[in-house]
């Protein structure tokens, strides 16, 4: 039994340390006892695979990860939680807490220094205010990790996992599918947290791909195209591309024709192959 899902216990530990929740830091702590064991099991950490956690809070997920993984490195931004974690994680010798900002720390160095050549996964209940930037940072930096298992708001989970070419897809879906194979693992109700947020959440797992699903010569251009395509959702793809890429409408018309894409198509209809084809045609036309 994880004591950290016992509301009375958590409240007493937090208040003993004078801790009050910060909305700005996305502090909603898990209190549903079934969620953390499931996340720890499904994230793939083990006696040979280490795990990095972002935002341990009071340590509820950290505790479960420490039971499964040979080593847990938890990055917490809020200094006030350090003495709390000292107390709640005192039973585990395989946990290291680092006080830092997951958006700023050198994660390549951290992985090298803390895990050497061992395999590593990331598992976290992410603060909602940096969900997409954290996920994108981890993917774009091509960290040597196997997978990323994270709790995010349900709506964000749907957008992230949406297959490019479907109605719910957006720039983040295309970016995520370039680097990984995303899967929605399970939903988590708002009442599973203290304090309870306004919306439900979901746990998603991004399995990192060895090779991207499409070959592009210029990755930066590919992501500029994706970003430009979704920059004005109400406009047609050709208008968004023209303004987003700062290219004349006539040139975009020719590029779409060459890539075999309808002139009145919309960004959400584009598959990964379509985005790759547009990128290739723009490269050639420059
Ligand atoms: N893991 C705990 C749980 O599930 O109960 C807490 C999750 S809470 C949603 C998010 C945690 O991330 C908080 O502890 C917050 O202080 C921390 N945090 C917020 N911004 C952060 C950042 N930039 N880097 C690292 N941790 C951060």
Image (spheres, rainbow, N blue to C red):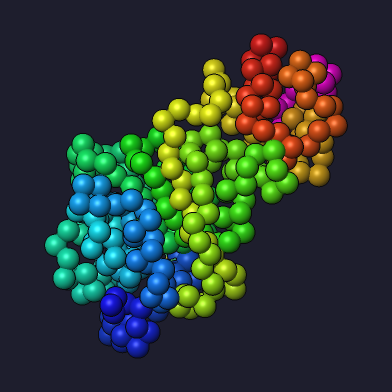
Residue located 21% across and 44% down the image: 115
Position above or below: 241 against 195: above
The answer, for residue 77, to whether it is visible in the render is no
**Residue pushed farthest left?**
93
Query: The C terminus appears in which quarter of the rendering?
Result: top right
Residue 78 position in % (x across, y down): 35, 65
In front here: 164 or 239?
Answer: 164
Residue located 42% across and 39% down the image: 208
Residue 268 position in % (x across, y down): 72, 40
Q: Main secondary structure of the magenta part?
A: helix
Ligand 1 occupies quarter: bottom left
Which contiguous range is marked in magenta? 244-254
Q: Which quadrant holds residue 279?
A: top right
Residue 157 position in % (x across, y down): 56, 55
Residue located 68% across and 27% down the image: 274
Residue 264 position in % (x across, y down): 85, 32
Query: The N terminus appears in which quarter of the rendering?
Result: bottom left
Q: Which quadrant holds residue 235?
A: top right
């Amino acid at each position: 039994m994880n004591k950290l899902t016992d509301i009375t216990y958590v409240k007493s530990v937090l208040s003993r340390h004078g801790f009050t929740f910060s909305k700005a830091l996305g502090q909603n702590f898990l209190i549903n006892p079934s969620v953390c064991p499931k996340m720890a099991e499904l994230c793939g950490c083990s006696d040979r695979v280490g795990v990095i956690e972002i935002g341990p809070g009071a340590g509820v997920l950290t505790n479960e990860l420490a039971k499964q993984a040979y080593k847990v490195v938890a990055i917490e931004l809020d200094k006030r939680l350090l003495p709390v974690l000292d107390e709640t994680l005192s039973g585990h010798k395989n946990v290291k807490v680092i006080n830092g900002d997951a958006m700023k720390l050198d994660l390549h160095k951290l992985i090298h220094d803390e895990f050497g050549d061992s395999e590593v996964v990331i598992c976290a209940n992410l603060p909602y205010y940096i969900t997409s930037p954290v996920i994108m940072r981890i993917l774009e930096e091509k960290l040597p990790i196997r997978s990323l298992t994270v709790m995010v708001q349900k709506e964000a989970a749907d957008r992230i996992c949406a297959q490019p070419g479907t109605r719910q897809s957006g720039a983040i879906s295309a970016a995520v599918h370039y680097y990984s194979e995303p899967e929605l693992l399970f939903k988590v109700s708002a009442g599973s947290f203290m304090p309870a947020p306004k919306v439900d959440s979901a746990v998603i797992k991004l399995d990192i791909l060895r090779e991207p699903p499409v070959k592009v010569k210029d990755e930066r251009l590919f992501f500029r195209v994706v970003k430009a395509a979704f920059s004005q959702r109400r406009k047609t793809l050709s208008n968004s591309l023209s303004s987003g890429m700062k290219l004349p409408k006539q040139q975009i018309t020719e590029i779409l024709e060459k890539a075999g894409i309808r002139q009145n198509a919309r960004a959400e209809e584009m598959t990964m192959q379509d985005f790759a084809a547009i990128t290739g045609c723009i490269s050639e036309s420059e």
